[in-house]
Image (tube, grey):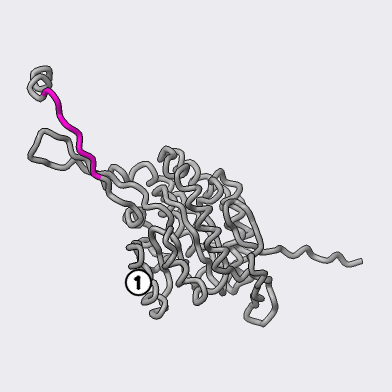
Amino acid sequence: MERLEIQKTYKIFIGGQFPRTESGRFYSLQNKKGDILANICLSSRKDFRNAVTAARGAFGGWSGRAAFNRSQILYRIAEMLEGRKEQFISELILQGASSKTALEEVTLSIDRFVYYAGWCDKYQALFSSVNPVASSHFNFSIPEPTGVVSVIASEESSLIGLVTAIAPIIAGGNTCVVLASESKPLCAVTFAEVLNTSDLPGGVVNILTGKSDELHSHFSSHMDVNALSYYRKNKSEIKTIKENASLNVKRIFIYDTLDITSDKAQSPYLIFDTQEIKTTWHPIENVGSAKAGY
């Protein structure tokens, strides 16, 4: 008898687990010929709230890790992507990409994680400073992670859009909740499987699938979200996001003109976007004795 192929179940990713959406809703993803590729979860407001709770719970441990350790984990993610390259290429082709374009997107995604792995323990030196003050104090300014970042990833790409949004956020010690592309969601769930087996603690990255027109208001109004990154071009959604963000003065970053495949889409300044600057004063004691001893 002819064997029936086992079809993959595409779920969402919250707190290191793969639940189905609490609403039980889904939509059928189709290719250009109208063939159904998979049933994809339609995430709800409750899913988003659960994801924010998971991200907040993971923030303390992740932000408190040594920068070098975060670097090791990001590099491990790149290794896992490399090992599953063919799977991602096949999913991109299913969603309409050519073989050449699919290979380029996966390779760029791997290289981008390596890039940010290298910056994990270096951006602090770039953005920190010792400030001149007119008193007997040292005055230091250093970057610290903002907290929980909600992300509405690019609608136009399946993998590189996720990587471009997530990598700088977690490299800087933040946690995040990400809405993947509605029309090209397959790689998002497979990417979550990579994260789940790469030493990244559960809750650091949470990935939802569904409709931005249903979820963008929740992503921007939740009071326990500290910042929002938006990678789409919908002017109406951008307007709503800006209005909602004012409710708790969350920081918003609109990357609607950013070419996510270009060199400009990887930069330590994208890490810096979701950092807060902490300034510390420290008194200088026995200044005269110190100078004499020197």
Check disc 1 and give the amino acid type.
Lys
Q: Could you tell me which secondary element the residue under label 1 belongs to? A: helix
Report the front residue among 31 and 165.
165
Q: Quadrant of residue 247?
A: bottom left
> In the rendered image, is residue 198 in sight?
yes
Drawn side of residue 289 relative to residue 239, left or right: left
Report the front residue among 136 and 275.
136
Q: From this viewpoint, which residue is outermost toward the right?
A: 1
Q: What percent of the width, then of the height, locates residue 103?
A: 55, 62
Q: From this viewpoint, which residue is outermost toward the top?
A: 293
The magenta segment is: 279-286
At horizontal 51% and vertical 69% (from top left) the residue drawn is 157
At horizontal 42% and vertical 61% (from top left) the residue drawn is 223
Q: Give the labeled residue for mark 1.
A: 242
Residue 23 among those drawn in magenta: no
- Image position of 198 with respect to 185: above or below: above
Q: Main secondary structure of the magenta part?
A: strand
Image quarter of the N terminus: bottom right
Q: Quadrant of residue 138?
A: top left
